[in-house]
Amino acid sequence: MEVCQNDDSAFLLMRFNQRDTSAFAMIYTKFFTELHVYANRLYTNTSESAEDAVQEAFCYLWERHDVIFDSLTKIKAFLFVAIKNRYKNHVSHLGVEQKYRDVLEREASFVEDILESELATSLLEYVERIPDPEGQVMKLYLTGLDAEAIADNMQLSIRTVYNVKSRAVGMLKKFFSLSNE
């Protein structure tokens, strides 16, 4: 019986090397489960399907007419390596995509930083034009002080600080609206 299986395997291998479709289907059925288990382990936590990986490996094998195998074990090894290489390419591609996203984020951040810097410079220029006490209150706000700290620093009531700040904001709005016309 064992000799018959070896003869069957040799006949299957010969037909497969001739790219006989029924032999290919038999090889597919014979190795699919093992390959699928392997691909499933590799592609866990990815958006890729293990079934797709196995099918692509078989398609790649089918297209390689130049490769002749001397055993079924070598066909299976070829398929395992094809799945592993596809996975490596997938991971490498994800790395390239992430690098591209990082570059885009840095570029967007760079543009935002420039705009923010230009806006801050313009704001500071306009704040310099505001007469005191409004100008002084706005300068202290821009350094990060809160109303209470400004009131202590300038020896004003908190209510006065809020009123002065409100007038300063009104002046800044006028400056910015005049500069945009």
Image (spheres, rainbow, N blue to C red):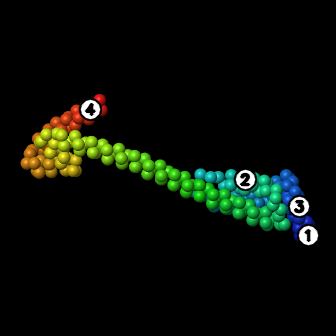
Q: Are marks 4 and 1 in contact (CB under 8 Å)?
A: no
| Residue at the extreme top of the image, as rendered | 181
**Label 4 residue SS:** helix
First of labels 3, 1 by sequence position: 1
Q: Amino acid at mark 2?
A: Gln
The image quadrant where one finds the N terminus is: bottom right
Residue 28: tell me if it is visible: no
Q: Give residue 136's quadrant in the image.
A: top left
- Cα distance, mark 2 to mark 1? 31 Å
**Label 3 residue SS:** helix
Q: Which residue carries the number 1 mark? A: 3
- Cα distance, mark 4 to mark 2? 64 Å
Residue 141: tell me if it is visible: yes
Q: Which residue carries the number 3 mark? A: 14
- Cα distance, mark 3 to mark 1? 16 Å
* Image spot of residue 181 (x, y percent): 29, 29
Q: Amino acid at mark 1?
A: Val
First of labels 3, 4 by sequence position: 3
First of labels 4, 2 by sequence position: 2
Which dot, 2 or 1, sits closer to the camera? 2
Q: Would residue 172 appear left or right of 78 to someone viewing this image?
A: left
Q: Which residue carries the number 4 mark? A: 177
First of labels 2, 3 by sequence position: 3
**Label 1 residue SS:** helix
- Cα distance, mark 2 to mark 3? 22 Å
